[in-house]
Amino acid sequence: MSNLYKIIVTGPFNSGKTAFIGTISDIEVVTTERKITTEDRGIKAETTVAMDYGRVELDGKVLHLNGTPGQARFDFMWEILAREMNGFIVLVDSTDPPSFPDAAQLIELFSGFHDVPYLVAANKTDLPGAVSLTELRRRVNPGDDITVMPCVAIQKTSVRQVLLQIIELIDERRGAS
């Protein structure tokens, strides 16, 4: 059994993917953030245009974290990044219900690339206006057997819990103990 994992961190625009990877990475994150020139610039100053890359070692396992761009205009990168992935995390901003259909589409898309384990991480659950995990599950509809868990992408312990959960799912699929 390999101790290397390629994990894709995907999710709609502004769901917290870059922060998630930056919070836990043992190396300086390789990022392709650029100034936003579209109508989205009122939301945040920069967006990922190709990928974010970080690496972390957890319990003797090395995780290569690849963050996708959240905007559909950069979707050409999604399939490239999904190559050889062992699992993926769909990060959803739980305070932004209009983004939930985008999260559902990303689940369908990434599930179609490769049959690998995934989970949904409800980011920003610590903020006012966050919907419950039950409501998020209902609206994103990942499937009854898919883990939906809370996350705060700027808290290392929270990000670590999400990563330990995806490793467990991957190891179960690999037939490991």
Image: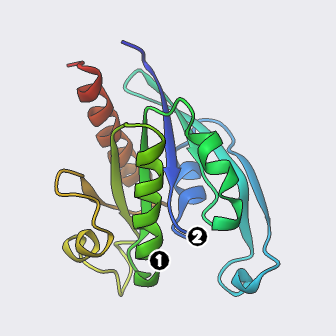
* Residue at figure coordinates x 60%, y 64% from the top left: 70
Query: Is mark 2 in CB contact (under 8 Å) with mark 1?
Result: yes
* Residue at figure coordinates x 51%, y 68% from the top left: 15
Under circle 1, the secondary element is helix
* Residue at figure coordinates x 34%, y 34% from the top left: 167
Q: Position of residue 25 (x, y in %)?
A: 57, 41
Q: Which image quarter: residue 83?
A: top right
Under circle 2, the secondary element is loop
Q: Amino acid at mark 2?
A: Phe
State the quadrant of the N terminus.
Answer: top left
Q: Residue furthest top?
A: 1
Could you give the CA–CA distance between mark 2 and mark 1, rounded to whole angstroms?
8 Å
Residue nearest the observer in this picture, 132 or 146:
146
Residue nearest the observer in this picture, 67 or 153:
67
Q: Which residue is mark 2?
A: 13
Q: Which image quarter: residue 55?
A: top right
For label 1, the crowd category at 10 Å Cα-Cα, with few meaning under 14, some 14 to 19 and many 20 or more, is some
Residue nearest the observer in this picture, 85 or 25:
85
Q: Amino acid at mark 1?
A: Ser
Q: Is residue 104 above or below residue 20?
A: below
Q: Position of residue 31 (x, y in %)?
A: 73, 50
Please state if 171 lies on the left or on the right of 90 as rendered.
left
Q: Which mark is residue 99?
A: 1
